[in-house]
Image (cartoon, helix red, strand yellow):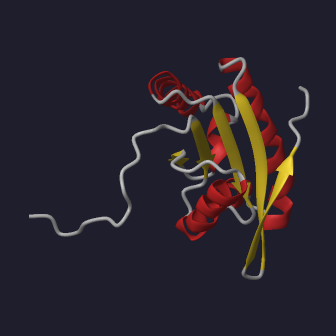
């Protein structure tokens, strides 16, 4: 006996794209809308963890995160045929606020730096992978997305 039947039909095709963003559920619908409507990646693989791309750019000494991330990504690249990764960091992220003990605006430079590091980590691991980086901002109740160029190391 099922308790619910989805109105969403099953689509077997994979889109080959993955988005890594923060698990903060207040942002989830906006991340989805951005990926669907702007990036045009329906059915993308979602990888939601606290801090999002911070997972790939953790400082030396917390390498366990990076190893776990690598193992999961290797699987997704191989089995889910991921060839495009979207990295999104968001304004007011509690992971940064807690780690840096700074208000939201003052966390942004560290977030952008780690976003860039995460992009380089991905490009090192998977040469040829298309990697894009975005900052999600909030002003009052309005949420907007800003693309960032990946800078050289
Ligand atoms: Zn967050």
Front-lying residue, 53 or 126: 126
- Locate residue 76 relative to residue 127 in the image: left or right: left
Residue extending farthest left: 1
Q: Residue at x 57, y 70 (%)?
A: 26
Front-lying residue, 13 or 79: 13
Coordinates of residue 67 in the picture (x, y in percent): 53, 25
Front-lying residue, 51 or 72: 72
Q: Quadrant of the N terminus?
A: bottom left
Q: Quadrant of the C terminus?
A: top right
User: How many numbered markers are drawn?
Assistant: 0
Front-lying residue, 71 or 94: 71
Q: Residue at x 71, y 17 (%)?
A: 127
**Where on the picture, by quarter, is residue 135?**
bottom right
The answer, for residue 60, to whether it is visible in the render is yes
Up the image or down, 127 lies above or below 21; here it is above
**Where on the picture, by quarter, is residue 117?**
top right
Coordinates of residue 140 in the picture (x, y in percent): 77, 82
The answer, for residue 103, to whether it is visible in the render is no
Coordinates of residue 25 in the picture (x, y in percent): 53, 66
Up the image or down, 16 lies above or below 139; here it is above
Coordinates of residue 11 in the picture (x, y in percent): 41, 47
Q: Residue at x 56, y 30 (%)?
A: 82
Residue extending farthest bottom: 140
């Amino acid at each position: 006996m099922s308790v619910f039947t989805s109105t969403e039909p099953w689509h077997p095709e994979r889109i080959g794209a993955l988005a890594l963003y923060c698990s903060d559920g207040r942002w989830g619908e906006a991340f989805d809308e951005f990926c669907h409507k702007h990036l045009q990646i329906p059915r993308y693989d979602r990888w939601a963890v606290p801090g999002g791309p911070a997972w790939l750019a953790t400082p030396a000494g917390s390498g366990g995160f990076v190893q776990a991330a690598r193992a999961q990504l290797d699987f997704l690249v191989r089995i889910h045929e991921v060839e495009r990764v979207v990295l999104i960091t968001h304004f007011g992220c509690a992971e940064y606020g807690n780690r840096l003990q700074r208000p939201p605006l003052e966390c942004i430079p560290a977030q952008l730096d780690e976003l860039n590091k995460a992009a380089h980590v991905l490009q090192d691991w998977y040469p040829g992978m298309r990697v894009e980086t975005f900052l999600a901002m909030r002003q009052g109740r309005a949420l907007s997305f800003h693309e960032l160029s990946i800078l050289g190391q």
